[in-house]
Image: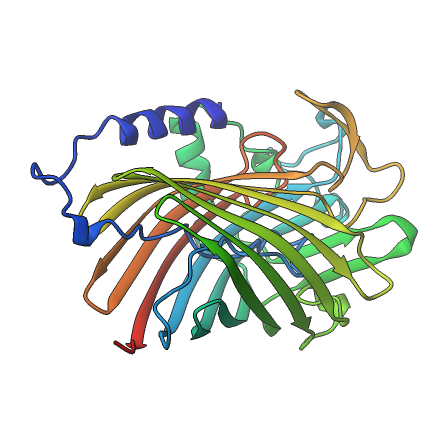
């Protein structure tokens, strides 16, 4: 049902007429680029992941400051059979709720970053995040919204609302756990983009990344070790209003936890107006962890599988706009296929071009 709902939204957005009747002038052909934001799904969060990037370089000397705010509502349980439980007033006992909870929290994530086009071929970037997890206040609204759309609640109806707890059990005894209100630093991500080919319709680049850990593994916000990554970027501009992007990368954790990850980000951008784009984007990423043996369940599409084992297949639907030096973006994100993504994610971000050399 989630997939059907997203398909309807995408079709309606694609059918919208351009917001300006006149054609986009040749001076306004520059696309706005993919949606930002990195993978903040809790089982993947301790390790690095690439945000979507353009292969095309900025004008030399461009410096851009960015900030963004994520709202995440997360809920996931370990497998259980409702018929074998003894609910009290429709809820599982407090003891069973604690045993079965994998993730149940709301989160606000403040992100800040900067980009610098140092020379025609090289762009350098840095990103840092501050994480806040808490009990939240929107659980009742989310259950009501799911009921309105006839969407499943993933077992929320058997658990008390407004809780903050996460216990992510990995194979080999690794555990990421916490509860209550937690404020923690994320890692510092350093990236560089080498734009080695540029033409009017096609741009190609290679991206490298190095993650500097700033937190501890057990808290769930960092692996406590560096990660390195590399990615291939391609931008294709076949028509004035359309742009297509592909980012394909690999991430290598340097610590004892975490597996090598592959990441694939396809993006479609439609220029609805001179300074406004509609964007459909995906993040397909293999999992860095595998759940404990025995924590298996039957997925309606993929059959019997383990917790946190399937790749993430997030879909982002959003808009980007700009006015002079100010740019902004908004998107919603969900994983309608494998369910290995945030239950609900909303993002709003802004960017400011500090200076551009002529």
Q: Taking 318 as reference, is 338 above or below it? A: above
Which one is in front, 101 or 112? 112
Q: Taking 348 as reference, is 255 above or below it? A: below
Q: Quadrant of residue 255?
A: bottom right
Residue drawn at (76%, 39%) of the image:
309
Q: How far from the left and from the top, in percent, is residue 291?
A: 81, 44
294 displayed left or right of 16: right
Which one is in front, 130 or 312? 312
Q: How far from the left and from the top, in percent, is residue 204?
A: 51, 51
Residue drawn at (75%, 30%) of the image:
85
Question: What is the residue that sits farthest to the right in this orientation?
Answer: 172
Q: Quadrant of residue 293?
A: top right
Which one is in front, 155 or 333? 333
Which one is in front, 88 or 117? 117
Q: How far from the left and from the top, in percent, is residue 79?
A: 75, 34
- The answer to whether one can see residue 4 in this image is yes
Q: How far from the left and from the top, in percent, is residue 119?
A: 45, 74
**Which color mode does the image show?**
rainbow
Q: Quadrant of the C terminus?
A: bottom left
Please count the marks in the image.
0
- The answer to whether one can see residue 160 in this image is no
């Amino acid at each position: 049902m989630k997939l059907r709902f997203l398909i309807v939204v995408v079709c309606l957005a694609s059918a919208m007429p351009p917001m300006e009747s006149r054609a986009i002038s040749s001076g306004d052909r520059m696309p706005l680029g993919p949606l930002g934001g990195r993978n903040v799904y809790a089982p993947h969060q301790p390790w690095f992941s690439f945000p979507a990037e353009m292969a095309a370089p900025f004008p030399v000397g461009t410096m851009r400051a960015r900030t963004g705010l994520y709202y995440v509502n997360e809920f996931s349980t370990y497998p259980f059979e409702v018929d074998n439980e003894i609910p009290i007033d429709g809820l599982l006992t407090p003891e069973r709720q604690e045993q079965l909870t994998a993730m149940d929290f709301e989160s606000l994530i403040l992100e800040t970053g900067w980009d610098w086009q140092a020379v025609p071929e090289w762009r350098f970037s840095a990103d840092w995040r501050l994480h806040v997890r808490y009990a939240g206040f929107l659980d009742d609204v989310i259950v009501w919204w799911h009921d309105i759309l006839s969407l499943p609640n993933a077992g929320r109806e058997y658990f008390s609302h407004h809780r903050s707890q996460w216990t992510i059990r990995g194979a080999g005894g690794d555990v990421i756990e916490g509860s209550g209100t937690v404020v923690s630093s994320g890692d510092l991500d350093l990236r560089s983009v080498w734009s080695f080919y540029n033409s009017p319709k096609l741009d190609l680049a290679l991206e490298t990344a190095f993650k500097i850990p700033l937190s501890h593994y057990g808290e769930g916000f960092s692996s406590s070790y560096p990660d390195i990554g590399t990615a291939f970027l391609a931008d294709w501009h076949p028509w004035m209003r359309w742009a297509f992007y592909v980012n394909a990368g690999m991430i290598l954790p340097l610590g004892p936890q975490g597996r090598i990850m592959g990441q694939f980000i396809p993006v479609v951008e439609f220029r609805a107006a001179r300074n406004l784009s509609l964007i459909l984007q995906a993040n397909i990423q293999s999992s860095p962890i595998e759940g404990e043996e025995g924590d298996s369940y039957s997925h309606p599409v993929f059959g019997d599988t383990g917790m946190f084992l399937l790749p993430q297949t997030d879909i982002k639907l959003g808009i980007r706009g700009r006015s002079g030096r100010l740019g902004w973006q908004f998107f919603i994100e969900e994983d309608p296929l494998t369910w290995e993504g945030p239950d609900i994610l909303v993002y709003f971000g802004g960017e400011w071009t500090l200076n551009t050399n002529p």
